[in-house]
Image (spheres, rainbow, N blue to C red):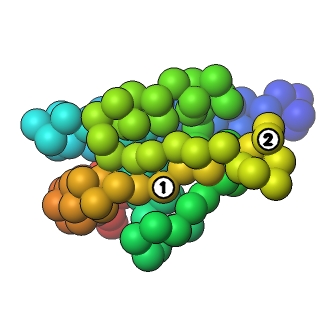
């Protein structure tokens, strides 16, 4: 019986985590929508800003795969949309033709800086004490 009770507690804890995640993602989507971004779009821009902080810095797409909650193909499609919007640029890795580099454009850096406080405020509202 103790195993069932422990399993039930874990299940409830897991569902609570998922609910907080879903509510937080929806709130971030809501505040970023007027700027043409969703939560996943922002997450990629934010990771790129951290991984490649200076203009012209590059980040391998493979380095982002394990850090975003998207499949590799979904991440590739998202980066394609960001590229179409002029927020990132992609290039092939000359050392490894299978690799792809991605970099924030000036437009991407400016938009990231503009919406960063909005995303952080949303996180504070949803996850704060």
Tag 2 secondary structure: loop
Q: Observer-nearest residue: 7 or 28?
A: 28
Count the marks.
2
Tag 1 secondary structure: strand
User: Residue 81: image x %, image y %?
Assistant: 39, 28
Q: Residue furthest bottom?
A: 54
User: Residue 10: image x %, image y %?
Assistant: 71, 38
Can residue 61 be seen in the rendering of this structure?
A: no
User: Residue 80: image x %, image y %?
Assistant: 46, 29
Q: Observer-nearest residue: 55 or 43?
A: 55
Q: Is residue 45 left or right of residue 52?
A: left
User: Residue 60: image x %, image y %?
Assistant: 66, 53
- Which one is in front in this view, the residue at disc 2 or the one at disc 1? 2
The residue located at (89%, 34%) in the rendering is: 3
Q: Is residue 116 left or right of residue 101?
A: left
Q: From this view, report whether residue 57 is shown above or below residue 45.
A: below
Q: Is residue 88 left or right of residue 85?
A: right
Question: Residue 97 — which label?
Answer: 2
Q: Determine the image quadrant of residue 5.
A: top right
Mark before the other along the chain sequence, 2 or 1? 2
Q: Which image quadrant: the N terminus?
A: top right
The residue located at (15%, 41%) in the rendering is: 35
Q: What residue did someone put label 1 on?
A: 103
Badge 1, how many Cα within 10 Å: few under 14, some, many 20+?
Answer: many
Badge 2, how many Cα within 10 Å: few under 14, some, many 20+?
Answer: few
The residue located at (62%, 50%) in the rendering is: 101
Q: Observer-nearest residue: 100 or 127?
A: 100
Can residue 28 be seen in the rendering of this structure?
A: yes
The residue located at (41%, 56%) in the rendering is: 104
């Amino acid at each position: 019986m103790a195993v069932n009770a422990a399993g039930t507690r874990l299940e409830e804890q897991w569902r609570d985590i998922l609910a907080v995640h879903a509510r937080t993602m929806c709130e971030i989507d809501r505040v970023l929508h007027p700027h043409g971004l969703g939560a996943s779009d922002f997450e990629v821009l934010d990771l790129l800003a951290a991984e490649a902080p200076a203009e012209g810095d590059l980040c391998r797409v493979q380095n982002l795969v394990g850090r975003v909650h998207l499949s590799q193909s979904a991440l590739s499609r998202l980066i394609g949309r960001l590229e179409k919007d002029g927020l990132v640029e992609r290039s092939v890795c000359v050392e490894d033709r299978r690799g792809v580099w991605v970099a924030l454009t000036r437009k991407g850096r400016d938009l990231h800086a503009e919406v960063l406080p909005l995303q952080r405020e949303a996180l504070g509202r949803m996850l704060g004490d």
